[in-house]
Image (cartoon, rainbow, N blue to C red):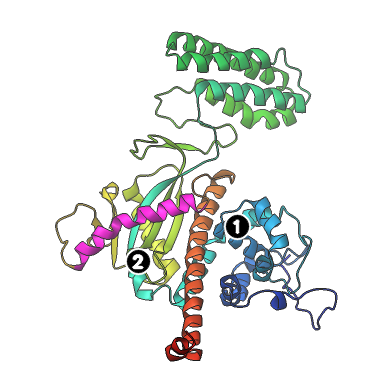
Amino acid sequence: MRPKKQRQARHDDLFRARLDQIINLKHALVVLADKIDWDWIDDQLAERFSAEGRPAEPVRFMIGMMLLKATYALSDEATWDRWVHDPYFQYLTGEEFFQHTLPHERSGLSHWRKRIGDDLDILLQESLRLAEESGALNKRDMARVTVDTTVQPKDIAFPTDAGLLLTAIQQLGKLARTHDVPLRQSYARVAKRAALMAGRYAHAKQFRRMQKKLKFLRTRLGRIVRDIRRKTDDDEALRQAFAVPLSRASKIRRQKQRQRDPKIYSWHAPETECIGKGKARTPWEFGVKVSLTTTNKRCKGGQFILHAKALPGSPYDGHTLKEVIEETEALTGRQIERAYVDKGYRGHDTENPDRVFKSGQKRGVHGQIKKELRRRSAIEAVIGHCKTDGHMARNFLKGRLGDQINAVMTAVGYNFRLILKWLSKLLCKMIAVIWAVICPVSMLKQTS
């Protein structure tokens, strides 16, 4: 059922402290909470809820928690724990009185992410509106953008053949015990020893011995797969329960190092891809490719992110530019006049190719365009902030939907950090002007 709006108390409570009486109303979070259009967000998310059933949690509370989590780069548990003792967090989520205990379930963030994961672009749109309204961003700054891609690593261990084979053996054994399927042998002890020795042999560059241990693991995994298939062949429910794990284990057993087909790099996150961006420090990264679009000019409040999207399948950058530009224009409501990209976007298929300028390009690059093209590399600093100050350095969310949610919410958190910083500076300037009017310089000299 659609969430109910939070009701405001009609009178003061003598036994509880009102938040507006114990906090600084000029704090950046308080100003931000009053500027966010919560009713518009509620209307945009109305289609995600049915007209029947139990009412969902209030939109302002859950969306506020998601914004706080992304802005301060906290985990779900850390966000809940900080909310209890931070009155500014409670004010942003719509509370009127200070709460000493959690009024909602901790699992609410996970449920809301799954429910509204496809509509989180409205938060990015709202962050741009707030930046424009507060003066940190100008509407004409969105006409000239910079587009680039990066890798959003998944929360997995570094994939090795021995580690994947051992995990497949252990997971199949665990699932068999759960469904009371008796195995002829689990190979848990000998498989763990073989995986350990394979790692030691690889470190010592004794690759023949390592290959023998890998062959040992593949053989034992094949035995478990065949044993489970024989004992679940007559039970339709067990066949459905073991269908995906057996398929995943068989693929891990058959895959080779240089095969052209997609490979599995993690048992619990099979959507993980291996992406090489040409870095000397990390030649291969395991996650998903993400496209980011920022303003080319550094605005008054900073360089804002206009669009963020996960690109599963690791497509060629040039084949994604057309869709990224169209979605950015729909999100900002401003037509893009110029787009600056790197050499990885050669061969793009945008509708107006003359408005796209690549690094190193000479033809048609002069005057203001030349200056803006030199600023293309400024997007690398934005990517770095998303990874160090946000959640893009390691994605803990599950599945393809988790990849998209993490990319968008990282961009939203980055924009809100810039807005909070801008509001803090703005308030400091206003206080300095008021203080200068109240206490002129001549009076200060006399007192000194």
Q: Amino acid at mark 2?
A: Arg
* Residue 273 located left or right of residue 179: left
Q: Residues within 10 Å of mark 2 (few under 14, many from 20)?
A: some
Q: Pick out the residue farthest to the right.
A: 15
At which x and y percent is residue 320?
36, 52
Which residue is located at x 18 percent, y 54 percent?
361
Q: Secondary structure at mark 1?
A: helix
**C-alpha distance separating marks 1 and 2:** 26 Å
> Where is residue 6, by image quadrant?
bottom right
Q: Residues within 10 Å of mark 1 (few under 14, many from 20)?
A: many
| Number of callouts | 2
Front-most of residues 156 and 87: 87
Name the residue located 29 percent from the left edge and 47 percent from the top edge.
Answer: 344
The amino acid type found where label 1 is placed reads Lys
Q: Is residue 289 above or below residue 447?
A: above
SS assignment for the magenta stretch, majority: helix
Q: Position of residue 414 (x, y in %)?
A: 48, 60
Q: Which one is nearer the viewer's eye here, 65 or 184?
A: 65
Q: Is residue 353 visible?
A: no
**Considering depth in this image, is 307 or 427 the residue closer to the camera?**
427
Q: Which residues are magenta?
A: 368-390
Image spot of residue 316 (x, y percent): 34, 45
Residue that label 1 marks: 69
The residue to which callout 2 is attached is 298
Percent coordinates x, y for residue 264 in the rendering: 51, 31
* Left or right for 364, reference 431: left
Quarter that holds the N terminus: bottom right
* Label 2: which secondary element: loop
- In primary-sequence order, the first of circles 1 and 2 is 1
Q: Residue at x 53, y 25 (%)?
A: 251
* Res. 336 in view: yes
Q: Is residue 76 above or below residue 144?
A: above
